[in-house]
Image (cartoon, rainbow, N blue to C red):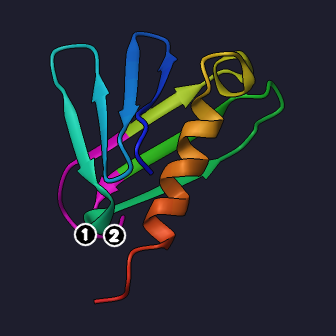
Amino acid sequence: MSDEITARAGSRFYSFDGRVLEIFGGSVTYSFHVCHMHFRVTGPDRKGRRSVEICHGQPEERGIRRIGHHSAAEWDGPTGLARLLETVQAAIDSVPEQ
């Protein structure tokens, strides 16, 4: 993958270049490399909201963790969050086992 994919959800801006997912907004910028990243999406709930948990390593390990709650409009809308996270998951799945 050679093109950067971006998405916006609430006050957060997501950028993925094929190897590194960056999340901008608020007082902290997060960077997650596909070789050391796990994420999980739950939902939608009855109102269409989804929760996205992104962490370094596996979820049960200690480390940086970002949990975001997104409305149906943020998820499926023109901001492209669902498409971006599908691309991130494909990149994670393509990393050889170590």
Q: Name the residue located 49 percent from the left edge and 17 percent from the top edge.
A: 8
Q: Which residue is mark 2?
A: 58
Q: Does residue 27 show up magenta in the picture? A: no
Q: Position of residue 27 (x, y in %)?
A: 16, 15
Kind of residue at badge 2: Gln
Q: Name the residue located 33 percent from the left edge and 60 percent from the top edge.
A: 34
Q: Which quadrant of the view contains residue 57? A: bottom left
Q: Residue furthest bottom?
A: 98
Examine the rendered structure and indicate whether residue 81 appears above or below residue 66.
above
Q: Which residue is mark 1?
A: 61
Which of these two is toward me, 41 or 62?
Answer: 41
Kind of element beneath mark 1: loop
Q: Which mark is residue 16?
A: none
Kind of element beneath mark 2: loop
Kind of residue at badge 1: Glu
Q: Which residues are magenta?
A: 55-66
Which of these two is toward me, 46 or 57?
Answer: 57
Q: Position of residue 90 (x, y in %)?
A: 55, 61
Q: Position of residue 11 (x, y in %)?
A: 40, 10
Q: Dot 2, how many residues are within 10 Å of its Cα: few (below 14), some (14-19), or many (20+)?
A: few
Q: Does residue 58 show up magenta in the picture? A: yes
Q: Which quadrant of the view contains residue 16? A: top left
Which of these two is toward me, 2 or 49?
Answer: 2
Which of these two is toward me, 15 or 30?
Answer: 15
Q: Main secondary structure of the magenta part?
A: loop
Image quadrant occupied by the C terminus:
bottom left
